[in-house]
Image: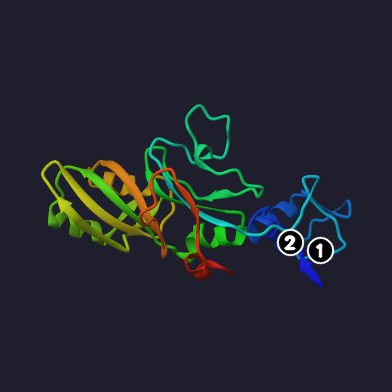
Amino acid sequence: MGIRLNKYLSACGVAARRKSDELIKLGKVKVNNKLIIKPQTIIDESVDIVKFENKILKFQDFVYYKMNKPRFCITSMSDTESKKTILSYLPKLEIKIFPIGRLDYDAEGLLLFTNDGDFAHKIAHPSFKITKTYICHIDGNIALNLLKKMKKGISLDDGFIRPIDIEIIDNKKSETLIKIVISEGRNHIVKNFFKFFNKKVKKLKRVAIGKINLGTLESGKIIKLDYNEIKEYKT
């Protein structure tokens, strides 16, 4: 039985199908030592030998994890960084996994890992509008009239943003605790949102991605996602 080459790359954990299309067109894939540049090429995985960057590919069992990323930790799988990275907290696995998106160095909370490129694409790509929920410690007090303005959305240099939901959890003179839900994945988007209103984010924690919740997972811990958490995002 045949399978499209781009789907095969995805099933081997190389990348999502759209990204695999690009890699194939760039000449990084060979089938039986012949360079293939058409993503729609049909192969027989039982007999054909597929290489990506001259390494033979094999089907992988897909795995899905969630981590409570600690603060002051880089979302990087490299061991050459000068600062501590998420690599320090990952278990030793035979299968290579990668983080879906990122969290800032000084941010904490929910971070997802997988080797399923299509799953990662669905979670991360803005076209799917998967929500991200954050708990923010904001410097100073936020008045209700300012909260109303926040709910209407703002235009930043990289585009318009309107929160799906934003509410005050606790409001004190020195600090306001806010929950904000967005479907954006732009760099520093939450910090830039509050910066627009001259408000500084002192601490930021992501507590949910779509219907996947951080729950009571301890800082620095990583566990497998169960079927009920991932079924909605499987293609």
Residue under numbered circle 2: 8
Query: Does residue 225 sit above or below 29 in this rendering?
Result: below
Q: Give the percent coordinates (x, y) of residue 112.
A: 49, 53
Q: CA distance from mark 2 to mark 1?
A: 8 Å
Q: Earlier in the sequence, mark 2 or mark 1?
A: 2
The label on residue 45 is 1
Q: Report the disc number at residue 207.
A: none
Question: Element type at marker 1?
Answer: loop
**SS of the residue under disc 2:** helix
- Residue beneath the point at 74% across and 54% down: 25
In the picture, the quarter occupied by the C terminus is bottom right
> Along the line of sight, which residue is nearer the eye, 62 or 160?
62
Give the x, y percent position of residue 207. 36, 54
Q: Is residue 157 left or right of residue 24?
A: left
Q: Position of residue 151 (x, y in %)?
A: 24, 60
Judge whether 166 appears above or below 192 on screen.
below
Q: Which image quarter: residue 159? A: bottom left
229 lies left or right of 177: right
- Indicate how the structure is coloured in the image: rainbow
Q: Are marks 2 and 1 in contact (CB under 8 Å)?
A: yes
Query: The N terminus is located in which quarter?
Result: bottom right
Q: Amino acid at mark 1?
A: Glu
The one nearer the camera, 99 or 88, is 88
At a point 69% along the width and 57% down the height, the residue shown is: 60
Q: Position of residue 149 (x, y in %)?
A: 20, 57
Mark 2, Cα crowd under 10 Å, few <14 / some 14-19 / many 20+, is many
Residue at the outermost top position = 82
